[in-house]
Image: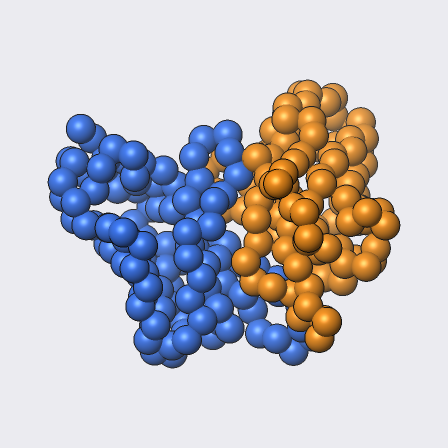
Chain colours: A blue, B orange
């Protein structure tokens, strides 16, 4: 079982639509990252959220960290075909031993049709 | 400034063989983590190297081992390959501060696609 559950698993929308993808866990994370990955490539970091309730914006992308630091959401406004890709969330576990052991969700595969 | 580089990009091995994958971290980074990503899945943490030692390990068998060199580059070795080891192997680098706490912003290489036949 995944420590981080991402939903939906697949999402196919038309250009110009809005969408939200979710990343949920029963565990508390000291920080959470969102990555975007294209086929055959490594994940590319989009944002890191650290504080419960934090909201970060990156152009048309809005990221929110849950108040309890157990969940996060990514909202995309007016999606474009270039947004197509696998969106991964990764949470950093506790800092008991100062190691940043990142755990990934299975990802949401987004397809934006022109 | 080169980012994280991995070699080779693709590899085909026969079941039972051994394989070595290589990673050079981003300039200024001293910590290397390895991940296995099966098709359609998120990356799974294998282990992390810092100061030439393995300091954290995920749920992978001893067939998976690694090494970090004084220049911070790293190798991932897999012995007795199984068909199920076929995956994209990702290397991520980050920086560990003087307090020993690794920066959470990891940068990934493009991966090595391993196919076991």
Work out whether A111 lies above or below B102: above
Q: Position of residue B36 (x, y in %)?
A: 61, 43
Work out whether B17 lies above or below A21: above
The residue under the point 37% across, 60% down is: A23
* Horizontal side of residue A48 vs A76, given as left or right: right
Say how many tags the image has: 0
Question: Residue B45 or B80: which is nearer the viewer?
Answer: B45
- Quadrant where the C terminus of chain A lies? top left
Q: Is residue A70 visible?
A: yes
Q: Position of residue B110 (x, y in %)?
A: 57, 35
The residue under the point 64% across, 24% down is: B10
Question: Image quarter for residue A96?
Answer: bottom right
In the image, farthest residue toward the front: B1
The residue under the point 31% across, 54% down is: A58
Q: Position of residue A89 (x, y in %)?
A: 43, 55
* Horizontal side of residue A114 vs A61, given as left or right: left
Q: Is residue A106 visible?
A: no
Question: Image quarter for residue B113?
Answer: top right
* Horizontal side of residue B43 vs A10, given as left or right: right
The residue under the point 43% across, 35% down is: A38
Q: Position of residue A4 (x, y in %)?
A: 45, 60
Question: Residue A79 or B82: which is nearer the viewer?
Answer: A79
Question: Residue B30 or A27: which is nearer the viewer?
Answer: B30
């Amino acid at each position: 079982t995944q420590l981080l559950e991402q939903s939906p698993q697949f999402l196919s929308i038309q250009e110009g639509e809005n969408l939200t993808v979710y990343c949920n866990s029963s565990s508390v994370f000291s920080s959470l990252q969102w990555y975007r990955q294209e086929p055959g490539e490594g994940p590319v970091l989009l944002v890191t959220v650290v504080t419960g309730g934090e909201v970060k914006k990156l152009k048309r992308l809005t990221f929110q960290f849950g108040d309890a630091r157990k969940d996060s959401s990514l909202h995309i406004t007016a999606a474009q075909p270039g947004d197509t890709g696998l969106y991964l969330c990764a949470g950093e576990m506790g800092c008991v031993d100062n190691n940043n052991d990142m755990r990934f969700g299975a990802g949401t595969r987004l397809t934006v049709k022109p | 400034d080169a980012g994280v580089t991995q070699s080779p990009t693709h590899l085909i091995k026969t079941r039972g063989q051994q394989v070595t994958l290589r990673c050079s971290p981003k300039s200024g980074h001293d910590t290397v983590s390895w991940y296995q990503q099966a098709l359609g899945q998120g990356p799974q943490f294998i282990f992390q190297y810092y100061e030439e030692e393995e300091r954290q390990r995920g749920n992978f068998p001893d067939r998976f081992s690694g090494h970090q060199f004084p220049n911070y580059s790293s190798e991932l070795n897999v012995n007795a390959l199984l068909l199920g080891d076929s995956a994209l192997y990702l290397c991520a680098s980050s920086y560990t501060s003087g307090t020993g706490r690794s920066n959470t912003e990891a940068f990934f290489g493009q991966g090595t696609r391993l196919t076991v036949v």
